[in-house]
Image (cartoon, rainbow, N blue to C red):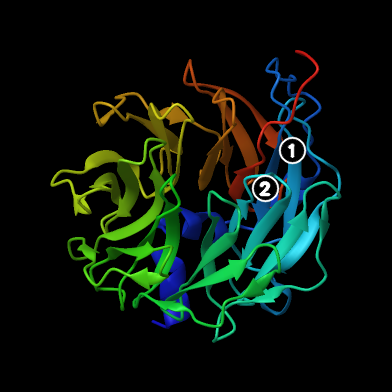
Amino acid sequence: MSRRAFARITRGAALAIALGLVGASWVVSSVSGSAAAVPAARAGCRATVFVLNSYVSFSEENEHAAVSTVDVRTRKLSPTDIPVGRGGGGMAITPDGKTVFVANSLDGSVSTIDVATRTKNPTDIPVSPKGYGASGLLVTPDGTTVFVANTDDGVVSTIDVATRTKNPNDIPVGGSPSELAITPDGRTVFVANGGASYDAAGYVSTIDVATRTKNPTDLLFAGGEKPGSMVVTPDGTTVFVVVSPETGSGSVATIDVATRSKAPSAIAVGAYPSGLAITPDGKTVFIANAGDDHSVSTIKVKTRSKNPVDIRVSGVPAWLAVTPDGKTVFVANDYAVSMIKVRSRTTIADITGFRSPTHLAITPCRPSKGRS
């Protein structure tokens, strides 16, 4: 198996299902859909959901991606997508809500989108020495730096937000880094790594942001276990990370930030967990399960216990994002974006019209003149 193929596997089985096993037939029907029948939200949060459609074209020669936008308050999909590079690998928004960064995994580059004008900068930022493999990325809390996992290079790259330039010195982490998370104080970046081969044990590395150096001691997982998407609790004490064993049964592991130690027992969730997100109040973690049940699990952060009843969604969930007001979870499925009410844990409706949505990012709330 090539390192390029292995890189996609280590990003989680859910993403593989969402991208690789979906036929072209649903693409035509979903594009004709709309959000016209979806009721508008009553919340006053005015924000925008950016949805990364990783495979707009299924041609190997023209495997490009595009970004769609949804108004959180009206729940309406913009009719115009924003073209980016090939093979979308991740997406992040600056804390000021002005710029979206998109990892182009098949180009080894990062695209930038101006939120106000919904336009892409014509010049992408090369990040991968090999020319492909750009994967998960994040923006530091102070909005100055973007960290990018380069899966096929075994390094983490950094970009200066203000100048849109890549630091020439990458941070070696080895293996196949795929996803990133950062503590709220901006001091430590956690790196999920699938290991050097398909059969190798995965691990999580940590990077000191100030010195741009990796801690020499990694947090090892059992053989066959691959850590994936991660979130850090708002109080900065705990990292939640999805784990996808070869068997398909999934779990969520927890890491103590202060001691850099992994809890001995993981929290069982659905099959093939992929993306996860945490509410702004730090009380609940939502996990997308891409197995046969097409579900979203929830975990109480305080007790680290899973709700016994999962939330069913209409498609194969791959990624999640919570609105800044903490009221709604948006879920990227294989053909639509579902919405879940946080308080009641119930689905609201689906927004259709997407083409292979795999990642989500939401801007901060803008001031609202009232409720709608």
How far across and how far down the image is residue 185, in percent? 43, 46
Residue 151 in the figure: left or right of residue 300: right
Q: Is residue 147 left or right of residue 44?
A: left
Quarter of the figure that contains the N terminus: bottom left
Q: Tell me residue 93's x, y (percent).
A: 64, 50
User: Residue drawn at (45%, 26%), measured in percent from left and top?
Assistant: 281
Amino acid type, residue under disc 1 in the picture: Val
One can see residue 316 in this view: no
Residue in front for this viewpoint, 141 or 107: 141
Which part of the image, by quadrant, shows the C terminus?
A: top right
Mark 1 burial class by Cα count in 10 Å: few <14, some 14-19, many 20+: many
**Residue position for label 1:** 70
Whether the residues at callouts 1 and 2 have beta carbons within 8 Å, the answer is: yes
Return the disc, 1 or 2, that comes first in the chain's sequence.
2
Q: Position of residue 144 (x, y in %)?
A: 60, 58
Residue bearing mark 2: 51
Question: For numbered disc 1, what is the local secondary structure?
Answer: strand
